[in-house]
Amino acid sequence: MEQVVVNGLFSGAQYSLIALGLTLIFGLMNVLNFAHGQMYVLGGLVTYTIVTFGFGFIPPDAFTIFGIDFIFPIALICAGMVLAILGALFEKLLFRTVIRRSKRDESTMLLAAATAFLLDASLLLIFGEKLHSVPDLVDGIISTDLEPVFPAIPFSDSFNLPYYKLLLGVIAFVMILLFVAGMRFTRPGRAMRALAQDRMAAQLMGVNVGRYTMIGFAVGAMLAGMTGGLLLAASGGIQATEGGAKSILAFEMIMLGGAGVTGGAIAGGFILGMMQSVGHSFLGNFTDLVIFAALVVFLSIRPQGLMGKPWG
Amino acid sequence: MSLSKNILRHMTGVAGATALILATSSLTGTLTTTARAADELHIGFVGVTSGPAAAWGTSNKRSMETRADWLNETGGVEIGGKKYKIVIDSFDDQKDPKLAIEGINQMISKGVHYVVGPNTDDGASAVRPDAEAKGVIYFPYAFPKELYTKPAKNAVLGMIANYQSGPAIFKWLKDNEKLQTLAMIAANESDALSQRDGGMAAAKAAGLKVVSGTVTYQSDTTDFAPILTPVIKSKPGAIYLAGVSPAHAPRIIKVGRELGFKGRFIATTGMDAKVLKEGAGDAANGFISVGGASTPELASPMMKEFVTRYTKKFGEYNDESNTKVYALDYILETLKANPKAMKDVNEFKKTIDSFSANNPFVNGGDKPNMKMRYVGMSSFGQKRQIFVPMVINEYRDGDFKTLFVGQAD
């Protein structure tokens, strides 16, 4: 059972990170960013490229100082920057134009779908169809047999957790904390929250809507990119074509947690991760069926999700 | 008056030219089937080149393109006393049977009657009615026996099937490593599930006990720890990854090792050593899979040149292409053996039974047991499979090492 819990927590941390950027963009702009998964994949592939090939004239092993390899964190930051720039460009050149020209909500959704297809096709062309992976950040596995320690606890057994997953879990946790703190305590964060809560009121209070919407889109894309880089190392690699599936996964989490709510995305991620882990051990192949049936029933009772608002 | 005469004369000229063009194109349309232009022979590829299984179709397509370029560079292929430039027409079916049907019909509308693919059971089964009704010989990389046993007639299996390699691998493991128990996992899609069922039957026939045989995963899964945890708890001696795609295998193997599994992983699909090395590293050591139909000992100079050309053209090589290089040569050599098959696929089918040619891709390709020929009598009751050596590989330290070599028929 311990292994099931560890699996669930790890999956949950991954899922929460995937959903955060999507929910931020939705909250700010009311845009369902269908290209979120593709942005995640692009971040992963940028990270892969830098970790594997360095920066062209600077090889990756040039970043090993005192025996510690810094190429992965550098690549992760670069992936975040590339995606932030891409997100800002998407917002300024595409979404802002469409929102100005069309009053229909579905126009932005269709544009988002088009950007997803564009990124999908471009990524496949540039990176090919193969799985791209990077070496583990650290070696070794924590292996514990708890059965003799807690014999009275039913389902008590052993669990294995590689150190690199533990490290990535900690990084994911820190990223989530930084994001939440940034949204709560910084001026741009407060401005974005104000925009998400009431766009008109925020504008009347002097919030520069255009500026902060672009920053929000850039931060959402940056989160997707850094998550892609992080999970490249956590899930054994990344494929240029897996963006669509990641978008769907992110949608599941914000449906569960509540669209546009940061806490909802985090909660949705952990709930889904734990349900999957427990389900696969006790429900076998019926896991997804049960999860989706439960989600449908839940949404029919509480359409705004766990933490979403039922209005607006 | 003179103006109207001029117009009349001009119109008569245009009409005459149009009639001539129409008559010529109609005549050409009647006479050509696979050879669309006088010097071009179009061969089709319909298969998956995007998504998680893209590596299967991509290696097909790239093998065909590499070989076609090579043949064209040397002046093309002579069939019935006439030289043809080989042109590969490709269609990505995205692993979707509906698109596979569309792809086959697109080939038919282009006058292409010899097609490599599809790569999946669903796709290959879906195209069968149109292929048989409209005269297409196709070379699927799919395992359903119904495609190759009578009354089916137009499909020719392009590789070794899992029900041929599975029993051989299980027997080898039982004899050499005293394997007794086995677990199986499969993607929740028809190809993998049918391979799992075939594997189940083969394991039982080999006297192995299947301790976990029902666990499946969605094809877009990237986190395999929750799925593998109950499988490993069943304490299998080996885990058979039924129909596993090259992108899933490293992830499954790596997570399996992290969860403490020490036995062998087995697959009866083709794998990519570079992807395994990058994705699973040393965790993949000992992984058994069906190799491309070549080993360093078997590879002829021509196979080595093919690998060089492929690598130069695409910047990488996939071991699976050692198998996939064959289909185009089988089509061309059979057409050479009976040029009437250029216009009539029934002639191709007649030639299958007696066809034999030296195998350029293996050393000793002129020996009877290594020659290019159609096989499949024991599996399908008719010759509907191309002969390729059955190479069973073991992954070790970044490369495939030959575990043993067998024959399918």
Image: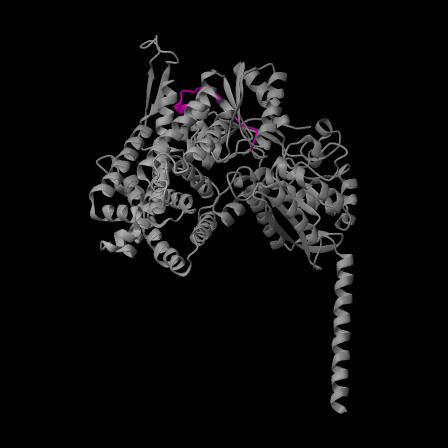
Q: Is residue B177 above or below residue A182?
A: above
- Residue drawn at (70%, 59%), measured in percent from left and top? B37
- Count the marks: 0
- Residue drawn at (66%, 49%), measured in percent from left and top? B43
- Image quarter hosting the N terminus of chain A: top left
**Residue in front for this viewpoint, B328 or A215:** A215
- Residue drawn at (38%, 43%), measured in percent from left and top? A40
Q: Is residue B306 above or below residue B170?
A: below
Judged left or right of residue B131, residue A291 is: left
- Residue drawn at (75%, 29%), measured in percent from left and top? B381
Q: Specify start and end residues of the magenta stretch as a single range.
A: B257-269
Question: Magenta includes A19?
Answer: no
- Looking at the image, can residue A56 be seen? no
Q: Position of residue B258 (x, y in %)?
A: 39, 24
Q: Position of residue A155 (x, y in %)?
A: 39, 13
Q: Is residue B270 above or below residue A48?
A: above
Residue B63 lies in quadrant: top right
The coloring applied to the image is: one colour
Q: Position of residue A6 (x, y in %)?
A: 35, 24
Q: Position of residue B24 (x, y in %)?
A: 76, 66
Q: Is residue B182 above or below residue A199?
A: above
**Residue in front for this viewpoint, B399 or A162:** A162
- Looking at the image, can residue B188 be seen? yes
**Residue in front for this viewpoint, B404 or B6:** B6
Q: Main secondary structure of the magenta part?
A: loop
Judged left or right of residue B404, residue A205 is: left
